[in-house]
Amino acid sequence: MRYANGVIAGFVATIVLSAIMLMKSAMGLMPQLNVIQMLTEMGTNYGGLPASPVIGWIMHLFIGSILWGLIFAATAPMWPGSSYLARGASFSVAAWLLMMIVAMPMAGAGFFGMALGIMAPIATLVLHVIYGLVLGAVFGRLESRTVHSAHARR
């Protein structure tokens, strides 16, 4: 159940993150930082996938829901913090660092996305922390329900 809880929490956190990204885009804030476009281009350049924003959205949902959800579920007790909320936040900072040193250069945005300007690493850090807080909060809630229901069945 722990891994299912991780995927569910990752999905909820990804939906929240996606809504914020769409609002940022609608307000015209930092148009040069378009994660979906970056993922689409990476899928095309490195995976031979069609150059469609649908590919970018699928990759975004997969990474946030399944990849990060499963990794968080597997490693949650190892992250600093006394609550899943704090552990989610610290996990998201590690995910952000990975994005800054691996994904951003692969996407052509340079180390820490500096080709997009100083606001790129700051904005992505804020978005990742929000993602991590939601991930941790939802995961913690689901885990406590799982434990309570397991005790109730005994």
Image: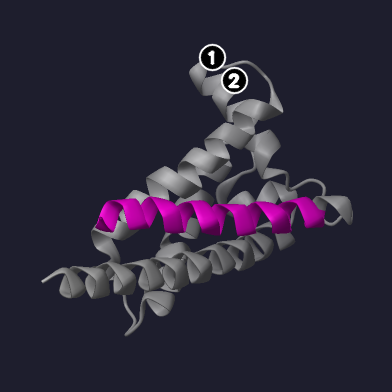
Q: Which secondary structure lies at badge 2? A: helix
Name the residue at 74% across, 55% down: 117
| Label 1 close to label 2 by CB (< 8 Å) | yes
36 lies above or below 97: above
Left or right side of 145 for 17: right
20 lies above or below 116: below
Left or right side of 35 for 137: left
Observer-nearest of 110 and 81? 81
Q: Which secondary structure lies at badge 1? A: loop
Crowding at label 1, few (<14), some or many (≥20) Cα neighbours within 10 Å?
few
Name the residue at 45% across, 67% down: 138
Residue beneath disc 1:
48
Amino acid type at mark 2:
Thr
CA separation in Å, label 1 and label 2: 5 Å
Q: Which residues are magenta?
A: 1-24
Residue 101 visible in the picture = no
Name the residue at 67% across, 38% down: 36
For this orientation, the residue located farthest to the front is 153
> Percent x, y for residue 3?
28, 52
Observer-nearest of 78 and 135? 135
Name the residue at 48% across, 39% down: 62
